[in-house]
Image (cartoon, rainbow, N blue to C red):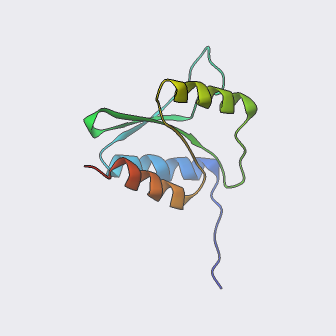
Amino acid sequence: MTMTVSLTEKQLEKRFCNAVKSAGGMALKFSAQFKAGVPDRIVLMPKGKIYFVELKRENGVVSEIQQHTFAEFAKFGFPVRVINSVKMIENFIAEVTADD
């Protein structure tokens, strides 16, 4: 029997930041004083790639204001990813390093 352990959002965020750093990028804490619903992190990768990432615990829910803000970012062509597992971290890193 395989048992999976659910990480807290803080644990997931630490793993995420370490994975981004290992891949050659930076995962900066993002807070916008006058804009509600912004993602947790701005990820800067080589070759000018920028991603916005919201980290949630496994059963975490994206709020309505976050959904609205993420849609606004998408209109400007900025990708927003919601990550809630170690597997999703691995998939994100594979995606952002694919053409390096």
Left or right side of 76 for 59: right
Q: Compare residues 82 and 24 and report the one nearer the observer.
A: 82
Q: Residue furthest bottom?
A: 1
Q: Compare residues 39 and 68 and report the one nearer the observer.
A: 68
- Relative to residue 31, is residue 52 depicted above or below? below
Q: Residue furthest top?
A: 34
Q: Position of residue 53 (x, y in %)?
A: 52, 39
- Relative to residue 61, is residue 70 depicted above or below? above
Q: Kindly identify the residue that appears in the image at 67 percent across and 33 percent down.
A: 67
- Relative to residue 2, is residue 19 depicted above or below? above
Q: Position of residue 40 (x, y in %)?
A: 56, 35
Q: The N terminus appears in which quarter of the rendering?
A: bottom right
Q: Kindly identify the residue that appears in the image at 45 percent across and 51 percent down.
A: 92
Q: Position of residue 14 (x, y in %)?
A: 50, 49
Q: Kindly identify the residue that appears in the image at 64 percent across and 53 percent down.
A: 8
Q: How many marks?
A: 0
Q: Compare residues 55 and 74 and report the one nearer the observer.
A: 74
Residue 47 sits in which quadrant?
top left
Left or right side of 13 for 50: left
Q: Compare residues 66 and 19 and report the one nearer the observer.
A: 66
Q: Kindly identify the residue that appears in the image at 52 percent across and 61 percent down.
A: 87
Q: Position of residue 38 (x, y in %)?
A: 59, 28
Residue 6 sits in which quadrant?
bottom right
